[in-house]
Amino acid sequence: MNFGLGAKIERYVMWRGLSAFLLTTITLTVIVWMTQALREIDLVTAKGQTLQLFLIISSLAIPSLVVVLAPIALLIAILYTMNTLHQESELVIIAAAGGSPKRVTRPLLWLSLFVALLTAFLSIYVAPAGLKQLRGHVTQVRADLISSIMIPGAFTDVDSGLMVHIKERSVDGFLGGILISDTRNPEISFQYLADRGALVETGPSTYLVMQNGNIVRREKAENSSSIIEFESYAFDLSQFRERTTKAGYRTKERSTMELLGDLLNPDAEENSKRSELGAELHSRFVAPLYAFCFAMVAMLFMASPQTTRSGQGIAILSATAVAVAIRGVGFAAESLAENSAVGVVPLYAIPIGATIICLILLWQNVRLDFAQRVADRLADIFEKLIASRRAAKADAEAFNR
């Protein structure tokens, strides 16, 4: 095949694959992001935050979503591109002109390399930073007692067993119809009721100062209650703010350098979670390998021309089933790595081994049409059964006549 014509074919295939990958990635990311964002909608409804802040916070999880969805989007994009080339008979034309499947697979290999590098950058640097900022924002929002308590008509759970309800809020900041239910102590419960009050901040402390109310004290053991009236009472909320402003970062929310530092110089607390830290660190390096692996699987099953539409469908289903099986085994290896350092070996061996096998078969021009042969064989058997049934029915009708 002419070199110039071959270069045009490769650019054409690259453009189709890249456009399909970008469209698939954006679509999948938006769908998954919307389902995840709805789980944090209480930041707007219950915490009194703006929609803009909600969108900013929820968008910080997008890089971690792309890390998971990019290999899947690449698999779908390559299957779509190759299937389109099959349906429009472009692969058959390329083969008839003397072009090998490598003319089609080479640009897709470059595309898979780009996706792998993008996934590596997001997995190692961007995604952990985004999740860390997300945790910090969520912690600060939940610690904003003023915005959460001053929502008229809402029942706000400040802490486990502590609920605050405000009936109304005036323009000058005063609160009316205050109810506080404190059931944190299983033996004694308190209910605070006041006509009005206000939130007062004195330095690092925050108080809910209530006026003209009473306290209902109930002891469960003696089944007795007592009522205490007050003109002014200050309820300390500082302990809850101090508790919630300290963000406890999970393993996925820590940077790669922090994980490396904890593994190289562990303290007493981190040493007990050494396997978990190691599994998270290795999973970040393994994530881009699946992008390349899925691309190899898709090209292996779709590179050769298929003569029938059923052959295309069988190839797509086969490639999808193999990719799902490989990723499923990879998830199992990640779980094993969290409990034992031995699990790190299959963590890398699964995607690398599958990629090498696909590359060898692909470069040897091996056609994996066994699924097509099985399908054709089953179709022949099915047709013979139908033909024999029709013949038996015709013989029966002839005999009755």
Image (tube, rainbow, N blue to C red):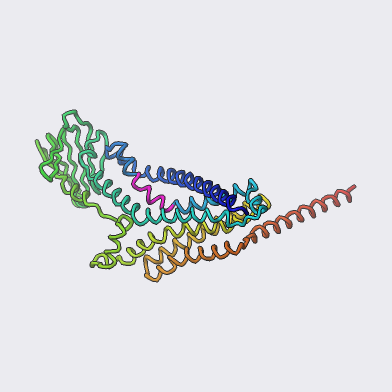
Q: Return the x and y of residue 148 as percentages of the image width and height.
A: 24, 39
Q: Return the x and y of residue 111 as percentages of the image width and height.
A: 49, 53
Q: Return the x and y of residue 323 as percentages of the image width and height.
A: 52, 58
Count of labels in the image: 0
Which of the 4 quarters of the picture holds residue 256? bottom left
Is 198 magenta? The answer is no
The residue range painted magenta reads 59-68
Depicted 219 relative to depicted 210: above or below: below
Which residue is at a point 48% across and 60% down the rendered structure image? 328
Along the line of sight, the residue nearer the viewer: 56 or 300? 300
**Image position of 166 (left or right of 85):** left
Which of the 4 quarters of the picture holds residue 234? top left
**Image position of 204 (left or right of 269):** left
Task: Please tell me whether the stretch drawn in magenta is mainly helix, strand or loop.
Answer: helix
Which residue is at a point 53% across and 59% down the rendered structure image? 296
**Image position of 351 (left or right of 307):** left
Which of the 4 quarters of the picture holds residue 376? bottom right
Q: Quadrant of the N terminus?
A: bottom right
Q: Return the x and y of residue 254 as percentages of the image width and height.
A: 29, 57
Depicted 306 relative to depicted 345: above or below: above
Which residue is at a point 26% across and 49% down the rendered structure image? 136
Along the line of sight, the residue nearer the viewer: 144 or 389? 144
Along the line of sight, the residue nearer the viewer: 205 or 348? 348
Residue furthest to the right: 401
Residue furthest to the bottom: 342
Along the line of sight, the residue nearer the viewer: 258 or 178? 258
Depicted 85 relative to depicted 285: above or below: above
Residue furthest to the top: 171
